[in-house]
Image (cartoon, rainbow, N blue to C red):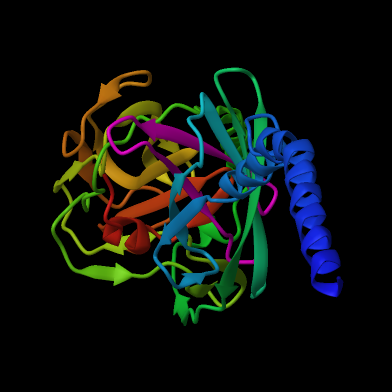
Amino acid sequence: MELARIHIANRWSRKLFCLVAFLFLPAVILAAEPGSSVPRRTKVATENNWSVRWQPTRVVNGAPLFLRVTAPVALESLSGNWLGHEVFFDLDTMSKTWYGIAGSSLQTHPGSYVLKLEGTTASGKEITFVRKITIRAAKYPRTVIQVAKQYTEPSPEQLQKVSEDTGLKQEAFQHVNPEREWSGKFYPPVQATISGVFGTQRTFNGKVHSVHQGLDYAVPSGTSVAAVNSGIVLLARPLYFEGNCVVLDHGQGLLTLYMHLSEIKVKEGEKIQRSEEIGLSGGSGRATGPHLHLAVRWQGIYLNPATLLRLKLP
């Protein structure tokens, strides 16, 4: 009798199990279909799957930074913000990688700084991503320089010229071209020994203190000076301190400046290719002698040209 009861109980348990499975199986199937919570969790994980790389890998104050960004989805546009400056990106359709140029000023303190990325898809959806980049302190030298008195104690007439040049440069530097004009590696403007490095703290005639914001090449007057990369001539005229000066706009907020030229070979607004001659070296402006001063400017701050010339760029 007892065995009969157990047999009946087991039979009803199997029937109950089948009934429960029949009732709840559709709900389980529906939960795994598109539109359920499973794909939503996967989508969130995909959106976080960004790839952000940069060079040089060791970032210091005063140095340029080349960024490579791969987004988790296809984007129509990508922009960034770092250290309060807008970062412009250009898409390489073959590798589906976005390229951008950035940098930090000499005054930037060591620490971790957030790079914020904002992308827009073809459907208009906006996605964002943040990545911290650590900046370390670079060591820059000091030097003492003697120049003509007019460059440390200019007359009222000379001060008027300096003021006019300042306004001219400010007007030119306000122009920011978000489009990428440069292509591939940046090459030195001349083949010569470097006589002055970026970031050097200088004292002129024992009175005026300044920071050397470029790279000096020891070349004799009349040496051919080439564009470090393709760009548009933003400025080509004589200035008080800079002497005969050419400024090239390489796009994405990046400029290169060529100072103390003896002769200018290009015109403002002209499109220049990499390695094309833009002028001849000299000693015009505030200079101790014939040489070429190369400066790199990005979004209003000066960066180390030597670092830019070492970058491996597409």
Q: Main secondary structure of the magenta part?
A: strand
Give x and y (percent) for residue 32.
64, 39
Could you tell me if residue 159 is visible in this image?
no
Report the side of 292 relative to 142 (left or right). left
Q: Quadrant of the N terminus?
A: bottom right
Q: Evaluate whether residue 239 shows in this view.
A: yes
Circle count: 0
Q: Is residue 299 left or right of residue 40?
A: left
Residue at 22% in and 49% down: 189
Check the image and name the residue furthest to the front.
1
Q: Is residue 23 left or right of residue 208?
A: right
Quick check: is 107 in the magenta stretch? Answer: yes
Q: Could you tell me which residue is drawn at 54 percent across and 51 percent down? A: 49
Q: Quadrant of residue 231?
A: top left
Q: Which of the pair 153/245 is nearer the observer?
A: 245
Residue 209 vs residue 12, the one in the foreground: 12
Q: Is residue 7 above or below residue 21?
A: below
Q: Position of residue 104 (x, y in %)?
A: 57, 59
Extent of the magenta region: 81-108
Is residue 2 located in the magenta-colored stretch of the structure? no
Percent coordinates x, y for residue 201 in the rendering:
53, 74
Placement of the C terminus among the 4 image quadrants: top left
Residue drawn at point x = 51 percent, y = 78 percent: 138
Asked which quadrant contains residue 216, the reply is: bottom left
Answer with the quarter of the image where residue 137 lies.
bottom right
Where's residue 256, x and y in %? 39, 43
Looking at this view, is 270 or 310 the one in front? 310
